[in-house]
Amino acid sequence: MHANATAEAACIEAFSKVCASISHEIKNTMAIINENAGLLDDLVMMSGGENISAERVKAVSDTISMQVKRTNVMMNNLNRFAHSHDYETGQENLHDILTLIVSLTVRQAAQKSLEISTECSENIEINTRLLPYYALVYLTLRLLIDHSDDRDKLTVKGELQDGCVSVCFTAPCVAAQFMTDFSENQLQVLVAMLNVESRGETNSLRLVLPPA
């Protein structure tokens, strides 16, 4: 029971971090939309006394449209993460999972000027408990970001080796403390739940998921 409760806490932590990050970004997009809506009002007021170029109006309209699209992408990402809990186990494409997880950490990476790249074949499928797996990959990447130096370059690589699906997180400047923290925190409960093997090296961590 204790292990299950801890695993549930890890999933809640992941979902909470995702929601907090996305809500912050949505506040930013709404602020930009509100600012440009006010600018449109100003242009309407000015149009009675001077000629307003179509280019100025279009620039404001394009900015609003871009922010609406950006918000829709974030909400779609949040929905995808949330719906990973629709079924206890399920099959999903690893490339899609890694692309989603990396997109959910853009704000944290930007705060440290980190560059995160993803490498994964588009034909690798996993069959596992999806929400815990999402939580494990997301929280691992967040932990790696926290332990990376500013302007570091991180790589998240998905591979299929001997029937096992592995995700390797690599950072040239990752501190050795990262590995210690990973082995001691509650993510190990998710590792145990999913029967994942974690392999730590000097500047990388590999999570290996055995065949379903």
Image: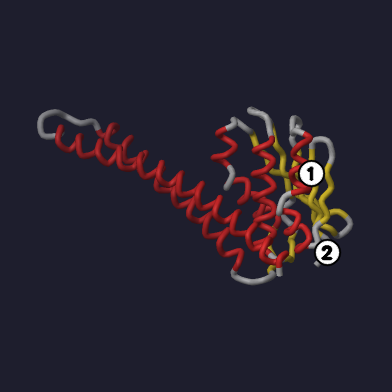
Residue 83, percent across and down? 57, 64
Label 1 and label 2: CA atoms lie apart by 19 Å
| Viewer-proximal residue among 182 and 50 | 182
Name the kind of residue labelled 1 in the image.
Answer: Leu
Relative depth, front residue between 203 and 61: 203
Residue at the location (62% across, 50% down)?
101
Front residue (pair 202, 38): 202
Residue 105 x, y percent position in the rendering: 59, 44
At which x and y percent is residue 173?
Answer: 74, 30
Question: Callout 1: 10 Å neighbours few (<14), some, many (20+)?
Answer: many
Q: In the image, 211: left or right of 6?
A: right
User: Which comes before the other along the chain, label 1 or label 2?
Assistant: 1
Residue located farthest toward the left when viewing the structure as drawn = 49
Q: How is the image coloured?
A: secondary structure
Q: Looking at the image, do the residues carrying marks 1 and 2 touch, with CB atoms under 8 Å apart?
A: no
Q: Amino acid at mark 2?
A: Pro
Question: For the C terminus, which image quadrant?
Answer: bottom right
Spot occupied by residue 45 in the image (x, y as percentages of width and height): 14, 36
Residue extending furthest toward the front:
2
Badge count:
2
Determine which residue is flagged by label 1: 205
Q: Considering the image in quadrants, where does the N terminus appear?
A: bottom right
Q: Answer left or right for 34 relative to 156.
A: left
> Which label belongs to residue 211?
2
User: What residue is shown at x 72% (from left), y 44% (from top)?
Assistant: 156
Nearer the observer, disc 1 or disc 2?
1
